[in-house]
């Protein structure tokens, strides 16, 4: 079928901010879809609130709206743009839910907009548990016993029939939010109550548990002529009971016979037909009883998903791209396979390697959270690795995680601890399996504890046995060469071999190279070498040589398919797995670097191991190495490719950590020199640098003991910010206000790591934090953007909202900040990007007639791409990352046409998005430790509106009428008066607990009283639960007060009541309300903003 | 396990480790890209004379069971080449490890070689004879042995794999939770009778015929056409099988006599024999089609089916102009996959609608055969 000509313009909905369960895989799929559809001549209108995406780059769509993802905003966009169709299957659950909403309200019909890809009945049939089950039974497929529950009473009746353990899943929530397993009636009641509330349709599916069954997924595609193909089979390492997003998964499926696989395949085809997904990709999950082979269908996603991104990277078959083409009428046989060129997309990829995905967790950021893995997803990122065997692939995946693991490290522990860690699924279980085997536990016993298939366990056993052989061999004789070769084939890293043999990583590397044991590279080609492949998508492996007996033949060779070119080329190191503090923003920067270098005529080579990203699309860079970002793996690639240089500036800490070791090996690091990076990062050298430039930083000191710490604090004055010197990125950082807290902190810190000093900085209370991104060619420096934070300094910059341009600082101070930033860039000889964090402290004027005085401090300088680069670029229309990449290759800013800073007429506000809803019991209070997973941007004519949009986009919609609950710490009470007064004047009804009420009433503001939780009912939490409150302003200090008021914030979160936990946040909300009352929100595309 | 060598006739030598049975074996080296179904592949009589390389790297994972066989009497391949053999099967139906099965049946295997390099070599240089040995580790001597071997092209291998005696087949296709005995058909009254020429038949063809509702009788490859017609069948199936179709002269002669007498369905070698019987030509592919992911377009319905493939020879349908029309085309390389006689109820396909291993997308062809017998098409 040819493509449809009755539709011309298509609206694509993105997935919004990065949250747990919805990460950059939807940027990958959405970007692919946009490109594929524009290639076919369609006009694309795109809406996504997440500025850190490639898809929201102005070149990707014809009209790009960085606006909140709500039905109101979408209706405005549709009214303005009048698209013919919506493709709702590329933006995760968010896009699908919005499409359902717009469709059900009749809006799409009224405006003649068609849903393509999946129609409303199909979406409903797949998403509504009851309809889905009914459909499965109709086609003779087995499903778990279950019932859809809409009330507590029904729930209690039905559980007798279903029995424990039972699985609960609220309908229409992201990645199974609010789901869980109940082992008893008490847990069941609790989960059911929560689930009913979380589900937008107040429906929870209660289901027979298939706990411990084998879990599989099939990625299925269907075209308009009903041709169906399976792209990839995935087998979960972790058995049923752990969310597939949190499971280690393997492709292709390993332990199914052909009969069982075909049975599953037939079932998957029947499912996609019965559900009626017209065109595109779907993901279908199955559970298989390990002893009987009973197979049940678990669920289906009628859209592209995290699994489809993984399947695309695992096979080389671009599911989203093909799905987009199918949605406009093409059939699978009409689309070419990019990799083989000759063959069509109507086939099933076959792989000759093993792919392993391991999720990445960040429980260390949420110490109060339950780290048990359940049916509710908790991981924030993932890595994928490719090896010829499962053993190789698994060990490569472990070292890709960047959590300090180079393989299966030894764990000092006892058998009871091991058993406990095996029994309860957790992020470290895989290492405990190896440890259990080391300590003599049998595969069967481990299976009984974990339900992990013995095939996987036996492979780990082989790895552990190999460890012993490595230890025993001295790694020197010829026999040891054979051993080393085998160890490398098993995926052992040099570092791990070094640990086992008591040598250094460098020793092993040298020895290995001496012995000629080097990796070769093989192609991911969709067809197991049956056809010639044209796309250099590569992975490393260790293979055996072969030779020819022909007289003319060369000596034995190990086949390597890398075939490096002679072109001038640059390697760009990616950012590895997403984690809190290092996410999609850095992938965005890496992708821009690729685009920029292609512009300059370089061959671009990407190295990364994150399957969710645009950077690991084989279509992005000229050559893609899907490899761990370790010194060993990166050096091997450099040796093979021999690039002109390597770019480490764009991928965050991951590649930056490699800068010095790579330079030591003689690798040319492009851009700012590693020495300059060190000058900015080393505390002592940094102090000297600031001194030289006559710039200020908060006073500081270091301490090894409680006494020293107290002495430092006395010298510089409380409050102080304390953190251990050995961790980066705000980990274990605290603000302490007095000696008692300081001593307490020191005791804990010294216990945790006695050999490392504690860093103590003066904490600048109530200071305004400012971020500056700048670009420099080594001579000229241009300011990219000055961002004034909403939340005060001390709250991690990644967690603060901020505004471009600054919304409260006077222009002379902004100018001074820019001057300082430029001076720093020049002094550090920055070539590329630089980010500086400032704190501006206001000195209250003595008389009210006087202007306040400002004092500027420098908190941090990072001579590299920062998290804010995409946001600044979207706000100003200047593609900073691209320019920086060109500068690093020798272009001057002048040559690039950048001579001065861009002034903008609008305001862009960035807001952070948090995963608190995933971690029951965790407080939402912000601090120096970064906790956000993603960000949104609000853009409009003025600050109030932009802020309101940013809040709406981060699911914290600011009300324009109703009740506002205020409860603030004493220190904040004076600042609250003006805010409360204005709110009251604007018609809000204020409610407060006794202390705040008294304080405000004394100052003439009318406030209603509400009980604190401990004061008896009805109390504030009752009000929140009854949704009688429209907004909450709640600031606290001190551990006890925080504990007492936790239930307020948790219930606000649970019941989706917007809130702020800072006074500065409250002020910004006030400004937003003022503007919202004056005028309606409007929309404008990024292309219009930057015309 | 000790060392083993694989030496190709062009002098290429791969060093690996022996697995399965120790010993020496010669055959035509081909590769198969299926990711599941090694047991079906091993027991497929079409592989008689061939050494099979699996491109999928992890072998032995789910062991071996008594159900998933395509012929009786153990594996038919001459040798088995894999990247990694795993000796700890894990599957609820597994009864034995793959290594044990190969040892019990004296099938020589080799592991630990770069199967991707071997596959690329075969792709670029064509399928060729090869030798695996774990007893003679001298590559020159092995090369001499393999070069002395006459090769399988000129040999009639069908006679080695066909049944000696006619038999009746009663088992249906594998279904979860249903025992083999329960899968048998229990009524024969009024059922169409299909006589199957066994050129090296895969059991799954027979199982599919049972499922399609036929009374199934299997006869040896050399059975004269007259004897078949005497059985008064409603339809005749020409089965798959190994080797060069031109060597199966008796099959070609008998088929000539059957065309137009009864509805005929040809599969794989049966398709090629049909082509030759009608006076057409067959040719050899460079490295054949062996796998479970080839898209084949049914030109009648326009639908694309993912098919199971295992053949080295093709029918040149152009050589049959006027007699047949093309019904199926392989979308990978455009090769001709199926034909239908313009006059008589005769049709055939090059791929394997019976699956085992591979997708079930084309099993409807057995029903089409039934409709043909009923005179519907």
Image: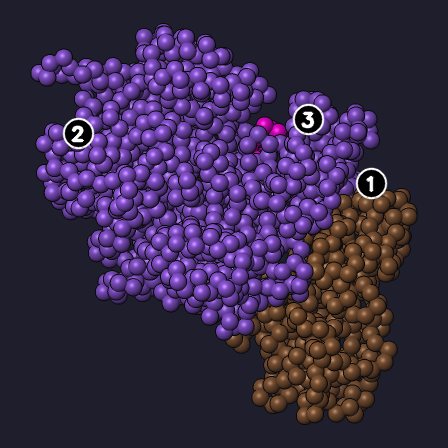
Chain colours: A purple, B brown
Q: Residue furthest front?
A: A1016
Residue receiving disc 3: A499
In this view of the protein, which residue sits in the foreground, A990 or B114? A990
Left or right: where A423 falls relative to A1013: right
Q: Are marks 1 and 2 on the same chain?
A: yes
Residue A180 can be seen in this image: yes
Q: Main secondary structure of the magenta part?
A: helix
Q: Is residue B95 placed above or below A715 in the rendered structure?
A: below
- Residue marked by disc 2: A999
Q: Nearer the viewer, residue A318 or A985?
A: A985
Spot occupied by residue A955 in the image (x, y as percentages of width and height): 30, 45
Residues marked 2 and 3, same chain: yes
Q: Please state the extent of the stretch shown in magenta in the rendering.
A: A628-637
Where residue B228 sits in the image (x, y, percent)?
Answer: 78, 87
Q: Are discs 1 and 3 both within one chain?
A: yes
Q: Chain of mark 1?
A: A
Q: Which residue is mark 1?
A: A551
Quarter holding the N terminus of chain A is bottom left
Q: Are marks 2 and 3 in contact (CB under 8 Å)?
A: no
* Residue at x-position 53% and y-position 25%: A658
Q: Quadrant where the C terminus of chain A lies?
A: top left
Q: Are marks 1 and 3 in contact (CB under 8 Å)?
A: no
Q: Label for residue A130?
A: none
- Answer whether residue B350 is visible to the viewer in this image: no
Q: Which residue does the image show at 79% across and 25% down from the upper left?
A: A474
């Amino acid at each position: 079928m040819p493509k449809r000509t009755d539709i011309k313009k298509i609206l694509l909905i993105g997935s919004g901010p990065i949250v747990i369960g919805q990460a950059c895989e939807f940027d990958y799929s959405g970007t692919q879809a946009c490109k594929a559809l524009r290639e076919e001549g369609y006009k694309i209108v795109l809406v996504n609130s997440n500025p850190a995406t490639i898809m929201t780059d102005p070149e990707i769509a014809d009209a790009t709206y960085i606006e909140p993802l709500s039905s109101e905003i979408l209706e405005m966009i549709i009214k303005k743009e009048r698209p013919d169709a919506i493709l709702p299957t590329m933006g995760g659950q968010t896009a699908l839910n919005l499409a359902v909403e717009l469709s059900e309200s009749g809006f799409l019909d009224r405006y003649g907009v068609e849903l393509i890809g999946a129609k409303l009945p199909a979406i409903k049939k797949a998403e509504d548990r009851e309809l889905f089950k009914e459909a499965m039974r109709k086609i003779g497929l087995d499903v778990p016993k279950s019932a859809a529950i809409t009330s507590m009473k029904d729930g209690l009746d039905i559980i007798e029939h279903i029995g424990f353990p039972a699985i609960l899943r609220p309908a229409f929530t992201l990645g199974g939010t609010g789901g869980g397993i109940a082992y008893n009636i008490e847990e069941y009641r609790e989960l059911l109550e929560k689930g009913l509330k979380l589900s937008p349709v107040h429906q929870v599916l209660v289901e027979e548990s298939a706990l411990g069954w084998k879990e599989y997924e099939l990625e299925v595609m269907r075209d308009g002529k009903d041709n169906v193909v399976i792209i990839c089979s995935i087998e979960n390492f972790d058995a049923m009971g752990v969310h597939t997003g949190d499971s280690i998964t393997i492709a292709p499926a390993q332990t199914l016979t052909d009969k069982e696989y075909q049975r599953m395949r037939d079932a998957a085809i029947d499912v996609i037909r019965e559900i009626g997904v017209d065109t595109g990709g779907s993901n279908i999950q199955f559970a298989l009883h390990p002893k009987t082979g009973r197979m049940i269908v678990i669920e289906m996603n009628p859209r592209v998903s995290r699994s489809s991104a993984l399947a695309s990277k695992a096979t080389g078959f671009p599911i989203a791209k093909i799905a987009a083409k199918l949605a406009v009428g093409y059939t699978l046989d009409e689309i070419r396979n990019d990799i083989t060129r000759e063959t069509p997309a109507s086939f099933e990829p076959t792989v000759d390697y093993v792919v392993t995905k391991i999720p990445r967790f960040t429980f260390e950021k949420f110490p109060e959270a339950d780290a048990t893995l359940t049916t509710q997803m908790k991981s924030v990122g993932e890595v994928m690795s490719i090896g010829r065997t499962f053993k190789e692939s698994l060990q490569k995946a472990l070292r890709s995680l960047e959590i300090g693991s180079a393989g299966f490290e030894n764990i000092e522990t006892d058998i009871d601890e091991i058993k406990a860690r095996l029994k309860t699924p957790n992020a470290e279980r895989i290492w405990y399996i190896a440890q259990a085997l080391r300590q003599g536990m049998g595969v069967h016993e481990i299976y009984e504890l974990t339900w992990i298939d013995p095939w996987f366990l036996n492979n780990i056993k082989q790895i552990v046995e190999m460890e012993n052989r490595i230890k025993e061999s001295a790694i020197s004789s010829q026999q040891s060469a054979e051993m080393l070769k085998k160890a490398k084939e098993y995926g052992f890293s040099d570092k791990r071999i070094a640990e086992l043999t008591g040598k250094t990583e460098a020793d092993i590397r040298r020895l290995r190279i001496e012995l000629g044991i080097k990796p070769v590279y093989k192609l991911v080609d969709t067809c197991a070498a049956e056809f010639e492949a044209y796309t250099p998508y590569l992975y490393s492996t260790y293979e055996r040589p072969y030779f020819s007996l022909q007289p003319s033949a060369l000596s034995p060779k190990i086949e390597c398919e890398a075939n490096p070119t002679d072109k001038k080329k640059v390697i760009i190191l990616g950012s590895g797995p997403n984690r809190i503090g290092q996410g999609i923003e850095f992938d965005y920067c890496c992708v821009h670097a690729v685009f920029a270098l292609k512009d300059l005529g370089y061959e671009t080579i990407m190295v990364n191991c994150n399957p969710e990203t645009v950077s690991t699309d084989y279509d992005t860079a000229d050559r893609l190495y899907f490899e761990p970002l370790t010194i060993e793996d990166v050096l091997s690639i450099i040796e093979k490719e021999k690039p002109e240089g390597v770019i480490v500036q764009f991928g965050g800490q991951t590649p930056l950590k490699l800068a010095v070791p790579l330079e030591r090996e003689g690798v040319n690091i492009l851009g700012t020199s590693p020495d300059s990076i060190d000058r900015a990062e080393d505390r002592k050298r940094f102090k000297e640098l600031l001194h030289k430039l006559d710039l200020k930083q908060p006073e500081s000191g270091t301490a090894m003991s409680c006494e020293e710490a107290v002495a430092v604090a006395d010298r510089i004055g409380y409050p102080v910010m304390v953190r251990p010197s050995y961790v980066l990125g705000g980990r274990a950082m605290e603000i302490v206000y007095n000696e008692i807290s300081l001593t307490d902190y020191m005791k804990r810190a010294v216990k945790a790591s006695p050999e490392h000093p504690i860093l103590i900085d003066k904490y600048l209370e109530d200071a305004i934090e400012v971020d500056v991104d700048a670009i420099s060619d080594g001579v000229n420096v241009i300011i990219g953007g000055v961002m004034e934070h909403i939340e005060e300094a001390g709250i991690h910059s990644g967690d603060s909202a901020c505004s471009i341009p600054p919304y409260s600082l006077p222009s002379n101070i902004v100018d001074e900040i820019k001057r300082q930033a430029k001076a720093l860039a020049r002094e550090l000889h920055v070539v590329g990007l630089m980010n500086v964090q400032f704190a501006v402290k206001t000195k209250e004027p003595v008389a009210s007639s006087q202007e306040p005085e400002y004092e500027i401090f420098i908190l941090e300088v990072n001579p590299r791409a920062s998290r804010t680069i995409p946001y600044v670029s979207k706000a100003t229309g200047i593609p900073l990352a691209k320019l920086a990449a060109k500068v690093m290759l020798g272009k001057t800013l002048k040559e690039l046409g950048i001579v001065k800073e861009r002034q903008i007429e609008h305001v862009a506000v960035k807001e952070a998005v948090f995963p608190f809803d995933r971690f029951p019991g965790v407080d939402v209070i912000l601090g120096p430790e970064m906790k956000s997973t993603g960000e949104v941007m609000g853009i409009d004519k003025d600050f109030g509106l932009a802020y309101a949009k940013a809040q709406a986009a981060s699911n914290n919609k600011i009300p324009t009428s109703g009740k506002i609950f205020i409860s603030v710490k004493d220190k904040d009470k004076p600042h609250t008066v003006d805010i409360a007064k204005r709110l009251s004047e604007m018609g809000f009804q204020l409610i407060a607990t006794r202390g705040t009420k008294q304080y405000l009433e004394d100052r003439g503001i009318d406030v209603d009283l509400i009980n604190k939780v401990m004061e008896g009912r009805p109390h504030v939490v009752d009000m929140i639960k009854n949704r009688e409150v429209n907004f909450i302003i709640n600031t606290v200090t001190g551990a006890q007060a925080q504990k007492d008021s936790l239930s307020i914030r948790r219930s606000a979160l649970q019941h989706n009541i917007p809130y702020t936990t800072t006074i500065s946040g409250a002020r910004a909300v006030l400004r937003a309300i003022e503007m919202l009352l004056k005028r309606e929100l409007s929309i404008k595309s990024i292309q219009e903003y930057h015309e | 396990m000790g060392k083993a060598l694989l030496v190709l006739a062009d002098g290429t030598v791969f060093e690996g480790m022996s697995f399965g049975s120790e010993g020496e074996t010669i055959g035509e080296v081909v590769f198969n890209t299926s990711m599941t179904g090694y047991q079906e592949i091993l027991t497929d009589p079409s592989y008689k004379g061939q050494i099979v390389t699996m491109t999928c790297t992890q072998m032995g994972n789910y062991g071996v069971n008594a159900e998933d066989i395509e012929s009786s009497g153990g594996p038919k391949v001459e040798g088995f080449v894999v990247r990694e053999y795993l000796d700890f099967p894990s599957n609820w139906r597994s009864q034995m490890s793959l290594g044990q099965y190969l040892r019990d049946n004296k099938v020589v295997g080799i592991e630990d070689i770069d199967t991707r390099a071997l596959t690329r070599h075969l792709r670029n240089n064509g399928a060729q004879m090869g030798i695996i040995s774990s007893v003679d580790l001298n590559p020159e001597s092995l090369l001499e042995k393999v070069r002395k071997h006459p090769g399988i092209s000129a040999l009639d291998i069908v006679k080695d794999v066909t049944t000696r005696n006619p038999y009746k087949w009663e088992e249906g296709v594998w279904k979860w939770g249903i025992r083999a005995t329960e899968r048998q058909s229990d009524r024969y009254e009024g059922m169409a009778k299909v006589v199957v020429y066994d050129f090296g038949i895969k059991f799954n063809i027979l199982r599919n015929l049972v499922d399609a509702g036929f009374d199934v009788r299997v006869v040896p490859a050399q059975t004269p056409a007259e004897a078949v017609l005497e059985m008064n069948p409603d339809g005749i199936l020409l089965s798959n099988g190994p080797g060069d179709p031109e060597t199966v002269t008796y099959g070609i002669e008998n088929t000539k006599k059957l065309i137009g007498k009864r509805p005929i369905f040809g599969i794989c070698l049966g398709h090629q024999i049909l082509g030759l019987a009608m006076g057409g030509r067959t040719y050899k592919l460079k490295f054949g089609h062996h796998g479970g992911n080839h898209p084949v377009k049914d030109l009648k319905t326009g639908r694309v089916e993912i098919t199971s493939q295992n053949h080295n020879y093709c029918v040149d349908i152009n050589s049959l102009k006027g007699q047949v029309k093309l019904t199926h085309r392989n979308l990978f390389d455009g090769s001709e996959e199926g034909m239908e006689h313009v006059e008589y109820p005769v049709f055939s396909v090059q791929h394997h609608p019976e699956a085992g291993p591979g997708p079930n997308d084309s099993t409807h062809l057995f029903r089409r055969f039934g409709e043909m017998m009923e005179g519907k098409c």
